[in-house]
Image (spheres, rainbow, N blue to C red):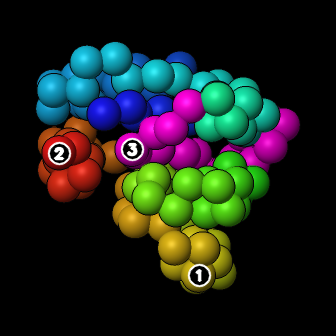
Amino acid sequence: MRVLVIDDSKFTRSILTNLFRELGVVSPEEATDGNEAIRMLEENHYSIVTVDLVMPSSSGFDVIKYIKQNSQETKIIVCSSTSDKETILQLVKLGINEFILKPFNEEKAKCILKKYVV
């Protein structure tokens, strides 16, 4: 199982990759912005992607749209502090699997991630 954690915050990437490791994912991969993430998605298939919405270069929305066009089976977990009603509605229409609001409780986040780590 390949996992990609996309976030411009090193702190958040570290927490999420550690949670995935605790769930048995051997080598979760990381991207620091949307452009890097899209390059990685072009070259590899990922079972699960966590993505922040607000990042330098391409936004999380750009990444989600890319995944939906090219890898329908990839599970998308948005992890963001942006949670206004309009944004959530857009994400639902795009077909994301989960939304984790930052700052998040690690145990609650782990429970959500666990649903998708098979």
Element on which disc 1 rests: helix
Q: Nearer the viewer, mark 1 or mark 2?
A: 2
Q: Are marks 1 and 2 in contact (CB under 8 Å)?
A: no
Residue at which label 1 appears: 93
Q: How many numbered markers are drawn?
A: 3
Q: In front here: 99 or 115?
A: 115
For the C terminus, the quadrant is top left
Q: Are marks 3 and 2 in contact (CB under 8 Å)?
A: yes
Q: Is residue 96 magenta?
A: no
Question: What span is in magenta?
Answer: 44-60
Q: Looking at the image, can residue 8 be seen?
A: no
For the N terminus, the quadrant is top left
Residue at which label 2 appears: 118
Residue 103 occupies quadrant: top left
Residue at which label 3 appears: 47
Q: Quick one: label 3, few (<14), some, or many (20+) residues within 10 Å?
A: some
